[in-house]
Image (cartoon, grey):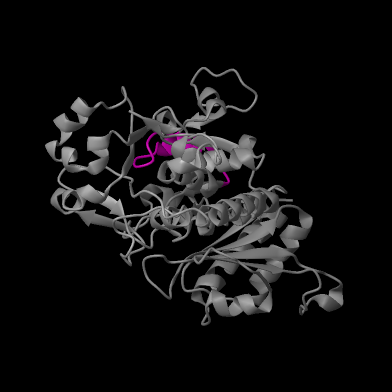
Amino acid sequence: MKKLYILLCGATAALLMAACQGGKTAAADAEAGDTLKMKYAKLLTIVKHGDGEESSDAAEGIDYQYAEAIIANPWKAGTMLHRYILIPKGEEGDKTVAMLAKRRSTGARCTTDTVRTPVESNLVFTAPHCQLLTELGCQNAITGVCDKDYINIPDIKSRAQADAKVAHPIMDCGSSMQPDIERIIALHPEALLISPFENSGGYGKLDKLRIPVIETADYMETSPLGRAEWIKLYGLLLGSSKADSLFSAIEKEYLQLKAEAAKLPLGLSILTERKTGNVWYVPGGKSTMGILLRDAHARYIFADDTHSGSLSMSPEQIIAKGNQVDVWAFKYFGGNALTKQDLLAEYQGYQALKAFQTGTVYETDTSCEPYFELTSFHPEILLREFIVLSHPEAGDKFGKLRFYKKY
């Protein structure tokens, strides 16, 4: 048994070396398998291998089945961020690991990790992914979290309490910016689900733990349904049978809402953020939020902008367009709802916004509302909010607001 374990470890190491040192890219190698068509996601490629695929081992009657997930680098076009070889656990999966190491023919100019699936113990760094794993029926696969106090999921909060007497406790691993390495070592998760950032320089001590880092770059997708489509990847990782049906339901409702909104007159103009220090960040015209506003058939003061990320504006630039803002709907964290007086104490310039003058200001407190948890992979929820906010003439046709409340 010990000999087999050593053999498998060596085979896996050989696979990783071959994957990162080979001469051709993973995208080229993906042609050898069955590439799953992504309808919206631009940063994710999933290729399935096996199920009758021709193999040099076919004469032995062995049909190796595994999946390959390739994540494009959102900050450097034409390059890859990470590549994962997803191999089922068990004896057949062990044979696949050995076979791939023997071939040594695939390559990728990026970090490559072999992940044995289903992943049954995950350290999750973000609240939206905790919510998604729960919806996939894999909440027990969450064995550790970071930033516990920012997660608005009752089950996760209760299981992460230090004195929790529950069947599936969750270890609090501290801050996502400075995770507790000792606790992570004690937890010994099978994977770390972490959101990557541009020029992060890696993950420090986490890189030395030899635990696969699943770089959850879904938030960098430039369309609402593009991010939601990453549900398919997480379904593969966790072995969930709910992934495809969950995404299909989200897509169906989103497209139905978009079609209904298109039948309405062009709606009110919505501004979604407030000033932060000396900067006022607003969504670019081609960003996920910008697309949501467009699909809600709402007006947006920066709709003609071509950026897919946030715009860093001066307060004066926003205020110059203040008379065009019909609805101001922003988020805040903690404390009581912000009154007019609170907002003016923060910045006197707010009074130049048309929405401030007419009282069409809406707020949502993300410290007690699961806003990020739900809307990250459920863009149809946020689309409905924007349709309701921008089309008061539609009455209750689209239902009531879920998150935003009038101050």
Whether residue 350 sits left or right of residue 239 in the image: it is: left
144 within the magenta span: no
Whether residue 25 sits left or right of residue 317 in the image: it is: right
Q: Residue at x 22, y 28 (%)?
A: 340
174 within the magenta span: yes
Q: Main secondary structure of the magenta part?
A: loop
Over which residues does the magenta segment extend? 173-190
Q: Residue at x 51, y 82 (%)?
A: 23
Q: Residue at x 49, y 22 (%)?
A: 161
Give residue 356's quadrant in the image: top left
Can residue 221 be spotted in the picture?
Answer: yes
Q: Whole-percent x and y of residue 346?
A: 17, 33
Whether residue 158 sits left or right of residue 368 in the image: it is: right
Give residue 7's quadrant in the image: bottom right
Q: Residue at x 41, y 65 (%)?
A: 74
Q: Whole-percent x and y of residue 146?
A: 44, 36
Where 60 sits versus 238, above or below? Answer: below
User: How many numbered discs, if any?
Assistant: 0
